[in-house]
Amino acid sequence: MGDINVEVEVEYCGGCGYLPKFQELSDKIRESVPSANITGKEGRTGSFEVSVNGQLIYSKLRTMAFPDFQNVTDIVNDAAAGREIKSVDKQQPINCIIL
């Protein structure tokens, strides 16, 4: 498993404190696909954008929620196995209270 080189890039909002989320996702991917090349960079306010091999698979700017990290890991696994790269279809719950 993991014969094909997989590039994962995450743009995250540093000012929002999203670095630990990037590190958590990176660790989860590395556990499953040790050969994946994972890079993170500070970007736009509120961002947590995930790309696999140059293809955007998740945008927090669009959804307002973080992706489901297991779903992202599964997509990276698929890419490493030579399967089609799909978009993330699951997200973490949004903790929002409306008063």
Image (cartoon, rainbow, N blue to C red):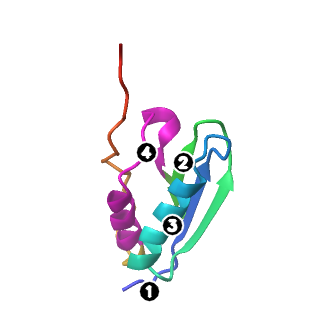
Disc 1: CA contacts within 10 A as few (<14), some (14-19) or many (>=20) = few
Element marked by disc 1 = loop
**Label 1 or label 2, whichever comes before in sequence order:** 1
Which region is colored magenta?
A: 57-79
Disc 4 from disc 3: Cα separation: 14 Å
Q: Of the residues tagged 1 and 2, which is closer to the observer?
A: 2
Identify which residue, 81 or 96, lies in the foreground: 96
- Quarter residue 10 falls in: bottom right
Q: Is residue 64 above or below residue 35?
A: above
The type of residue carrying mark 4 is Phe
Contact, mark 3 vs mark 1 (Cβ under 8 Å) = no
Residue tagged by mark 4? 66
Which element type, helix, strand or loop, lies under badge 2?
strand
- Residue behind mark 2: 49
The correct choice, above or below, for 86 with respect to 91 in the image is: below
- For marks 4 and 1, give the CA distance: 28 Å
As displayed, is residue 99 above or below residue 93? above
Magenta residues, dominant SS class: helix
Mark toward the start of the polypeptide (4 vs 2): 2
Residue at image location 44% in from the left, 70% down from the top: 29
Is residue 70 highlighted in magenta?
yes
Residue under numbered circle 1: 3
Q: Position of residue 75 (x, y in %)?
A: 37, 64
